[in-house]
Image (spheres, grey):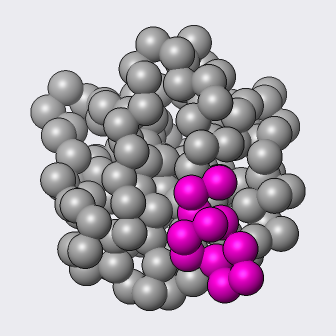
Amino acid sequence: MLDAGDPAPEISAQNQYGETVSPDFSAPTVVYFYPEDFTGGCTIQARDFREVLPEFREGGITVYGVSMDDVATHDEFAEEEGLLFDLLADPEGTVAEAFGLDTSGGRTGRRTFVLADGEVKAVYDPDRSDPSGHAEEVLNDTRNEYVQGG
């Protein structure tokens, strides 16, 4: 698994709208991996990121959610939860594998990466059963450490 100081991987995936997204990770970016759309902990985590998304955007921080669900499932999930950030569809696990995550079970574990300046800055392992508060922790750390004037 990638760790702080490792170079950012080159990735490309479709978002919930079917658009291809290829982040360059030069600006502060949060990529959070979660097991599956519409499940308890994953819904809590998505809602947490939704609630603090305006603050991420104020700091110039881009947020991506990634799971091995397909585009259609992400579209339904984003619509139902009012998510205004990209959910990257990774049904083959190529994005997860680029970050060094295990995909052998058809889903990834819950892991969050903060990237900036083309490298991994921090890695988080949120509570699998109750990730509430995780998004705010990542926001505060990222804003304080990697956003100029944060």
Q: Position of residue 149 (x, y in %)?
A: 73, 82
User: x and y percent of residue 111 in the render?
Assistant: 37, 41
Residue 17 belongs to magenta span = no
Main SS, magenta region, reads helix
Please say if 13 is above or below 92.
Answer: below
Left or right: 66 as drawn, with respect to 56? left
Viewer-side residue, 32 vs 143: 143
Q: Residue at x 42, y 23 (%)?
A: 127
Residue drawn at 23 percent across, 61 percent down: 3
The answer to whether residue 50 shows anywhere in this view is yes
Evaluate whether residue 88 shows in this view: no
Q: Quadrant of residue 57?
A: bottom right
Q: Nearer the viewer, residue 39 or 124?
A: 124
Work out whether 61 lies above or below 96: below
Q: In the image, what residue occupies the spot 32% across and 58% down? A: 95
Q: Quadrant of the C terminus?
A: bottom right
Image quadrant assignment for residue 136 = top right
> How far across and down, in percent of the image, does residue 72 sit?
61, 39
Q: Which residues are magenta?
A: 140-150
* Residue 31 on image: x %, y %: 48, 56
Left/right placement of residue 17 relative to residue 39 reads right
Q: Is residue 119 left or right of residue 29?
A: left
Towards the viewer: 34 or 113: 113
